[in-house]
Amino acid sequence: MEKNKKANELWTTRWDDRYSDEEFAYGEEPNNYLKKQLAKLAVGSILFPAEGEGRNAVFAAKSGWNVSAFDISIEGKNKAVKLAKKNEVTIDYKVGELETLDFEPDQFDAIALIYAHFPADIKSNYHKALDKYLKKNGTVIFESFSKKHIDYVRTNEKVGGPKEIESLFSIEEIKADFPNYEIVELVEQEIELKEGLYHNGTGSVIRFIGRKK
């Protein structure tokens, strides 16, 4: 228990440090894939886990969505609130681990997991836990680095992403984590990233659109 507590504290400190600078770590503009996929959906309620500095949540709010978000980093929340104020929108942003937060079952029409790289030992459990908060026929929008990305980040650290292969994703893992979903799209592909300070260059990602059965 003490070991887990220490690991959680180190993880939180890591992200607080990254988000404490004045400049936005991943920029103020939304992720391109998220932007494209949100345009296909009817506006409703959406949850952004591991939302960091709020660029995607703020975009969704500007697009008319009722937005909830959470992260372990208070510094991330501070930046997100600042960005929301700048864009004249409001978002419900909580700080803490998912199991400590008071989201309701079937609360959301969509859940957006955009580079939500949870620690390797909990990432699949987090995906499965999030399922209960999504309504039937709700949509998961997912973009994160694939296991092939390990070779890209070794070549160019500026592209960002975890350097431990266990924290990266495979198509097989996504299928296992979201078994009760119609697969609208599930691909692994190479993309060009230009997101703030820490996502710059060529990387390999998993993109997944799933509809809950």
Image (spheres, rainbow, N blue to C red):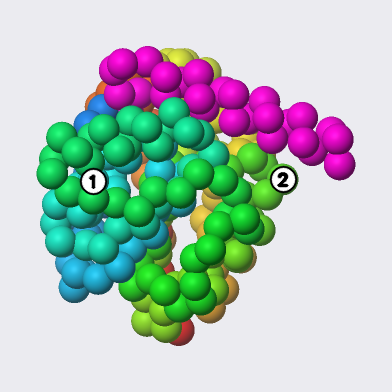
Residue 106 in sight here: yes
User: Callout 2 environment at 10 Å: few (<14), some (14 to 19), or many (20+)?
Assistant: few
Task: Work out whether mark 1 precedes mark 2 in sequence or the reverse, and give the earlier one.
Answer: 1
Residue 202 in sight here: no
Q: Where residue 119 appears, x then y in whole percent?
A: 64, 40
Q: Which residues are magenta?
A: 1-26
Instruction: Report the residue marked by disc 1.
Output: 58
Whether residue 176 is situated above or below residue 152 in the rendered picture: below
Q: Residue at x 34, y 72 (%)?
A: 109
Quarter placement of the C terminus: bottom left
In the image, is 63 to the left or to the right of 199?
left
Q: Secondary structure at mark 1?
A: helix
Residue 23 on the magenta segment: yes
Quarter placement of the N terminus: top right
Q: Secondary structure at mark 2?
A: loop
Q: Residue at x 30, y 24 (%)?
A: 24
Q: How many numbered callouts? A: 2
Instruction: Report the residue marked by disc 2.
Output: 121
Q: Residue at x 26, y 63 (%)?
A: 66
Whether residue 82 is situated above or below residue 23 in the rendered picture: below
Q: Residue at x 59, y 24 (%)?
A: 13
Q: Where residue 108 appears, x then y in whole percent?
A: 38, 71
